Image (cartoon, rainbow, N blue to C red):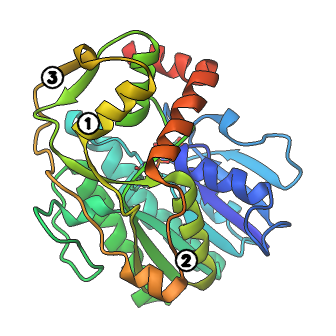
Amino acid sequence: MRILVTGGAGFIGSHYVRTMLAGGYPGYEQARVTVLDKLTYAGNRDNVPLGHPLLELVEGDVCDRDLLRELLPGHDAVVHFAAESHVDRSLASADAFIRTNVQGTQVLLDACVAAGVARVVHVSTDEVYGSIPEGSWTEEWPLLPNSPYAASKAASDLIARAYWRTHGLDLSITRCSNNFGPHQHPEKLIPLFITNLLEGEQVPLYGDGLNVREWLHVDDHSRAIQLVLTRGRAGEIYNVGGGNEQTNLAVTERLLELCGADHARIRRVADRKGHDLRYSLDETKIREELGYTPRIEFGQGLADTVAWYRDNVHWWKASKEQARG
Ligand code: NAD
């Protein structure tokens, strides 16, 4: 078994790769893993176990057609994580989002068809649905993305489905909620707030802090992806939620507590343009069809995540300095 993981040096992709190489997915203990990653500001080669005999790290771009045509033959499966992933960056400039997320997905899937890859999972997001004031999205819900990031993910999600329908590629799509856990770049809400608090700084909370997100531990998400890879049906979409809705203010208060800080450390900032109010996934399908349930309780997962950032200052310091310019 040879599996190619795009974006495998990023947050979620590297967790998936480390778990697989550590023997965490039954039947895949001997799988050879190729990570294809451009190593943008969000990718970090130290996120993967570089000396592992079953791992090959290829530094390259999912938009590089020649590279993909050369690399893909011989791989049995592809899990496609690579993307520009930060909403705020897509508000400043959407170019890289359209290029990597839309064109990159098309170029990758063309190469999968050409190489006869037997199985593909495309990792999408709940943000493709837009914002929902009450209730939860099923997989049949229309796509109404609001940010350039979400729109680029919706486009790639539809391209992925089209490659199943048109070319018969054995492909499934996952749409997950907000992930958290170790190795997440410190530009994202939870690691940004943890690292700011650890550095004695304030945390910038958007608007009234009442936007609701559904939090999913990266380990639960990775397990869901593996379930979809091995047992998901071709052409199907699977929502993956954490079942844990929290306002940004509630998450901030928990982080303050875990870091021993008080409310004075919250700095209110102008709301994000077009900020989605609430995300909520109905995950009945993946539960009933694949037996998936999230295992990591939010409070414990958050405490462990804070502990990881506390113990791995070297990992995030350089990225933060770079982001500050
Ligand atoms: P991330 O930003 O941490 O990692 C993305 C990785 O892709 C990085 O290693 C980066 O170097 C690589 N990459 C970027 N452009 C590339 C290119 N052109 N070619 C090859 N590699 C490239 O992102 P993440 O949080 O790990 O997200 C992974 C996937 O999950 C993305 O598709 C994202 O849209 C999706 N997702 C993430 C979340 C979340 O909460 N983090 C939620 C829903 C969906």
x%, y% of residue 87?
28, 42
Q: Amino acid at mark 1?
A: Asp
Which element carries disc 1, helix, strand or loop?
Answer: helix
> Is residue 46 visible to the viewer in this orientation of the structure?
yes
Q: Please tell me the numbered disc located at residue 154.
A: none
Q: Amino acid at mark 2?
A: Val
Q: Are marks 1 and 3 in contact (CB under 8 Å)?
A: no
Query: Mark 3: few, some, or many residues within 10 Å (few <14, many ≥20)?
Result: some
Task: Residue at 83% x, 66% y: name it.
Answer: 29
Q: Amino acid at mark 3?
A: Arg
| Precedes in sequence: disc 3 or disc 2 | 2
Which element carries disc 3, helix, strand or loop?
Answer: strand
Task: Residue at 44% x, 74% y: name it.
Answer: 173
In front of the other: 113 or 84? 84
From this view, report whether residue 254 is shown above or below residue 314.
below
The residue at label 3 has a CB less than 8 Å from ligand 1: no
Query: Mark 1: few, some, or many residues within 10 Å (few <14, many ≥20)?
Result: some
| Precedes in sequence: disc 2 or disc 1 | 1
Q: Quadrant of residue 196?
A: top left
| Precedes in sequence: disc 1 or disc 3 | 1
Q: Is the N terminus in the top left, top right, bottom left or bottom right quadrant?
A: bottom right
The residue at label 2 has a CB less than 8 Å from ligand 1: no
Reading the image, the residue beneath label 1 is: 88
Reading the image, the residue beneath label 3 is: 268
* View extreme (right): residue: 53
Task: Residue at 72% x, 71% y: name it.
Answer: 75
Q: Quadrant of residue 252?
A: top left
In front of the other: 310 or 153? 310
Report, in whole angstroms, how far the alpha carbon at label 2 lies from the one at label 1: 29 Å
Query: Mark 2: few, some, or many residues within 10 Å (few <14, many ≥20)?
Result: many
Q: Please tell me the numbered disc located at residue 228.
A: 2
Q: Is the C terminus in the top left, top right, bottom left or bottom right quadrant?
A: top left
